[in-house]
Amino acid sequence: MHNAAFRALGLDFAYGAFRVRPDDVGAAVAAVRALGLAGLNVTIPHKQAVIPHLDVLSPVARATGAVNTIVNRDGVLRGDNTDVPGLSLALDESGLAPRAKLAIVLGAGGSARATVVALARRTRTVVVAARRAEQARALLDELGPVVRARLLAVRLDALADARGSAAQHLAAADVVLNTTPVGMHGEPFLPFAFAATSAGCLFYDLVYTARVTPFLAAAHRARRRGVNGLGMLLHQGAVAFELWTGVSPPLEVMRRALRSAASPARAPATSAARPERARPASPRRR
């Protein structure tokens, strides 16, 4: 999508992928300065590991404790997190009300951090569900001081029972978001009481390797509306594009490129499908 946008605007940039091992994160960030790259996208599992190697963080990167975009300005490296505005814009496109009552976030990893921060700006209560309750509580302890929404932690398996201890959260949810990689390779989604949610509840999957993921297929069987993560990918990428180039991105050009790449015959190489990759917006203008 970035290369399509560069071509459409006649910008002399290129975007490529580099495989970076965890032990080489510092050297990879240093290469941004040495090679004069305009910046990087950073995928899991490096979104937190890059932070000590940066010069400054944006307020949203500090709030999330994770960086997915690096911008090089004359050798000064700024870390940002475009997943937060990207998700907010994608939820707007999906028809979620600007002010929701309750959101459920499945997972407590790196993607969940940005998801909780984004939702806390538009939702009164955010429930984080993880396989290990202590993992969800640790995330809430860290993010609680920097967001306004009420944050709650539950075990993920508690949401599999429509009559269990978390039943009230299911009934009150306006949106349920999957931030886990489960279903990325077609495996069945985890047990979840989809039908215990209201008929108007939106199910949003950050996974975008299939138009209908196993999470969304289960939601559809319960007659609930579902959307995959292509919208978030598009909008977070558009924000990063403008940070690197200083130019407003051609959003529809990028959207068409994404849809083409996400066709069943040619699924995109994604941060979750190739978690060891760090992705750069390649060299500065020639």
Image (cartoon, rainbow, N blue to C red):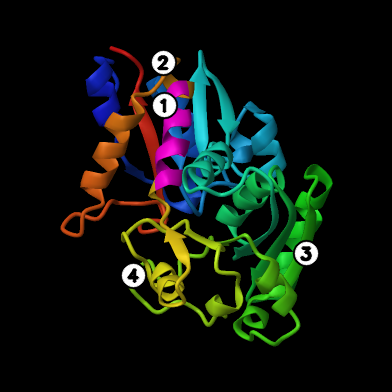
Residue occupying the point 53% across, 82% down:
191
Check contact, mark 4 vs mark 1: CB within 8 A: no
Q: Which residue is mark 1?
A: 241
Q: Residue furthest left?
A: 265
Kindly indicate the quadrant of the structure image that contains residue 278. Answer: top left
Labelled pair 2, 1 in contact (Cβ < 8 Å):
yes
Kind of residue sitting beneath label 4: His
- Tell me the tag on residue 152: 3
**The N terminus is located in which quarter?**
top left
Other residues around mark 3 within 10 Å, as few (<14) / some (14–19) / many (≥20): some
Q: Position of residue 125 (x, y in %)?
A: 75, 57
The question of residue 234 being in magenta is answered with yes
Label 2: how many residues lie within 10 Å, few (<14), some (14-19) or many (20+)?
few
Residue on which the image places disc 4 = 185
Which residue corresponds to the image point at 60% horizontal and 78% vertical from the top-left?
A: 196
Secondary structure mostly seen in the magenta stretch: helix
The stretch in magenta equals 231-242
Q: Earlier in the sequence, mark 3 or mark 4?
A: 3
> Picture coordinates of residue 233 (x, y %)?
42, 44
Q: Secondary structure at mark 2?
A: loop
Kind of residue at disc 3: Leu
* Horizontal side, residue 267 vs residue 220: left or right: left
Name the residue that disc number 2 marks: 247
Seen from the viewer's position, the closer of residues 89 and 85 is: 89
- Left or right: where 53 falls relative to 229: right
Q: Residues within 10 Å of mark 4 (few under 14, many from 20)?
A: few
The percent coordinates of residue 220 (x first, y second) are 41, 71
Q: Earlier in the sequence, mark 2 or mark 4?
A: 4
State the separation of the CA atoms marked 2 and 3.
Answer: 39 Å
Q: CA distance from mark 2 to mark 1?
A: 8 Å
